[in-house]
Image (tube, rainbow, N blue to C red):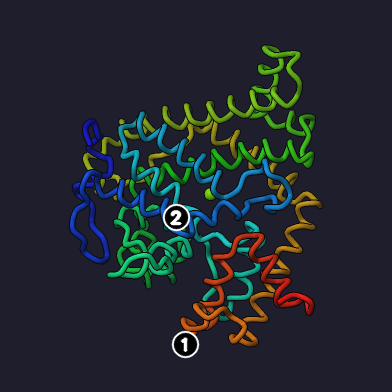
């Protein structure tokens, strides 16, 4: 790729794949990874997995698929400005939520609770597990056999205990080094995408009000400006105007601050990036503003009683499914039963984590309603 900065990830200098493959034709290694992710089954299931609202609550709410596309859009925009590798930033963004359970964090927490005696469950690790092992699409290997740089970006967090078992991608959690700038960027792009779309979805659902949000400075400033410029277009459009300005402020600040930090640190290579401190960041005042918005969403949206009622049901479904399969693995569909063998609880967790919201609801009905089969 021409114009790539010296500190960007270079597909021609990738640390390679776990199973050696001949080089791609007509595209580079990171483009190939991006394409493999888009064509895999776990990616398509993101369409029917949710973050805050459950899939059947409305057709306009974000799903994990639209969320991932928004993350990729933001990451690519910033990557291009900073001369980072856009394809790698896109691949990481599109893959970052592949390991999520149905029903957002409620599903993940319930599954983690069920898996406590069996090594726990963590969605970042599961995303890596999906691309490394669970996708079955290639004759020569399990998983998608992605490049080290893509896998490094997908594994955003990891406990040191787990990191030790993961080999090359786990090492940075033990050595406390950084991932590539593309990985750091996908991580912050995730945050920009979700705080903004949760404001939008929160308002659309009626769980949040403009009056409440007017007390959060990041929202309030842009809201006042949107209303001043467009006083008579109605609240719906004024909200869109506000959200797009918020995204713009965060993206521009992130780009400017990161460019300044890169200039100051002057990393000569991706190795220097990995050895240094985190470089992709908001400026201090904007980071504080974003944090206040996140806290607001936590208190007022994620803990809203209507969300809690739904997430409690979701957690019960995940727990019921896990307990039923663990008590009698013969209930598992044949393809999962065959894999069960030694690690039956991990296989059950893989099966449940792979479910969409609606599949989990149906499977629960099939297992617990006597008039279903
Ligand atoms: Mg995400």
Residue pictured at 70% horizontal, 32% vertical = 216
Q: Quadrant of the N terminus?
A: top left
Q: Residue 101, located in which quarter of the rendered image?
A: bottom right
Residue pictured at 53% horizontal, 26% vertical = 248
Say the numbered circle drawn on residue 195.
none
Residue pictured at 71% horizontal, 69% vertical = 317
Q: Is mark 1 within 8 Å of ligand 1?
A: no
Label 2 belongs to which residue? 156
Q: Secondary structure at mark 1?
A: loop
Can you say whether 271 is above or below 217 in the image? below
Q: Secondary structure at mark 2?
A: loop
- Whole-percent x, y for residue 114 in the image: 63, 75
Q: In this rendering, which labeled residue sits more in front, label 2 or label 1?
A: 1
Q: Is residue 75 left or right of residue 286?
A: left
Label 1 belongs to which residue? 342
Q: Quadrant of the C terminus?
A: bottom right
Q: CA distance from mark 2 to mark 1?
A: 28 Å
Q: Is residue 318 left or right of residue 40?
A: right
Q: Is mark 2 within 8 Å of ligand 1?
A: no
Q: Nearer the viewer, residue 344 or 192?
A: 344
- Whole-percent x, y for residue 231 in the image: 74, 13
- Whole-percent x, y for residue 313 in the image: 76, 63
Among the two numbered marks 2 and 1 on one chain, the one whose residue lies closer to the N terminus: 2
Q: Residue 3, located in which quarter of the rendered image?
A: top left
Q: Nearer the viewer, residue 23 or 292?
A: 23
Crowding near pointer 1: few (<14 within 10 Å), some, many (20+)? few
Q: Is residue 43 left or right of residue 182?
A: right
Residue pictured at 75% horizontal, 51% vertical = 303
Q: Nearer the viewer, residue 173 or 25?
A: 25
Q: Is residue 320 left or right of residue 267?
A: right
């Amino acid at each position: 790729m021409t114009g790539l900065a010296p500190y960007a990830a270079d597909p021609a200098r990738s640390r390679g794949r776990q199973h050696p493959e001949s080089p791609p034709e007509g595209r580079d290694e990171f483009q190939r990874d991006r394409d493999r992710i888009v064509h895999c089954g776990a990616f398509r299931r993101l369409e029917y997995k949710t973050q805050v609202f459950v899939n059947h609550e409305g057709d306009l709410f974000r799903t994990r698929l639209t969320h991932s596309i928004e993350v990729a859009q933001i990451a690519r925009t910033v990557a291009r400005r900073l001369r980072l590798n856009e394809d790698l930033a896109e691949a990481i963004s599109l893959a970052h939520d592949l390991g999520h359970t149905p029903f957002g964090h409620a599903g993940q927490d319930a599954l983690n609770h069920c898996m406590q005696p069996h090594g726990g469950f963590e969605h970042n690790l599961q995303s890596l597990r999906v691309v490394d092992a669970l996708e079955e699409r290639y004759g020569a290997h399990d998983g998608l056999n992605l490049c080290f740089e893509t896998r490094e970006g997908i594994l955003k967090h990891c406990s040191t205990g787990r990191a030790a078992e993961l080999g090359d991608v786990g090492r940075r959690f033990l050595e406390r080094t950084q991932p590539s700038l593309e990985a750091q960027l996908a991580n912050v792009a995730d945050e920009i995408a979700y705080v903004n779309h949760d404001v939008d979805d929160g308002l659309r659902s009626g769980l949040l009000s403009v009056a409440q949000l007017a007390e959060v400075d990041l929202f309030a400033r842009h809201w006042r400006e949107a209303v001043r410029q467009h006083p008579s277009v109605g609240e719906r459009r004024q909200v869109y105007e506000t959200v797009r300005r918020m995204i713009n402020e965060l993206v521009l600040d992130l780009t400017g601050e990161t460019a300044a930090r890169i200039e100051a640190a002057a990393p000569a290579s991706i190795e220097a990036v990995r050895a240094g401190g985190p470089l992709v960041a908001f400026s201090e005042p904007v980071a504080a503003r974003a944090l206040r918005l996140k806290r607001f969403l936590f208190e007022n949206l994620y803990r809203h009683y209507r969300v809690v009622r739904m997430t409690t049901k979701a957690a019960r479904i995940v727990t019921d499914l896990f307990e039923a399969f663990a008590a009698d693995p013969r209930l598992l569909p044949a393809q999962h039963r065959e894999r069960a063998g030694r690690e039956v609880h991990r296989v059950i967790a893989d099966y449940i984590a792979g479910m969409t919201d609606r599949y989990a609801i149906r499977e629960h009905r099939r297992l617990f309603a006597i008039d279903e089969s």
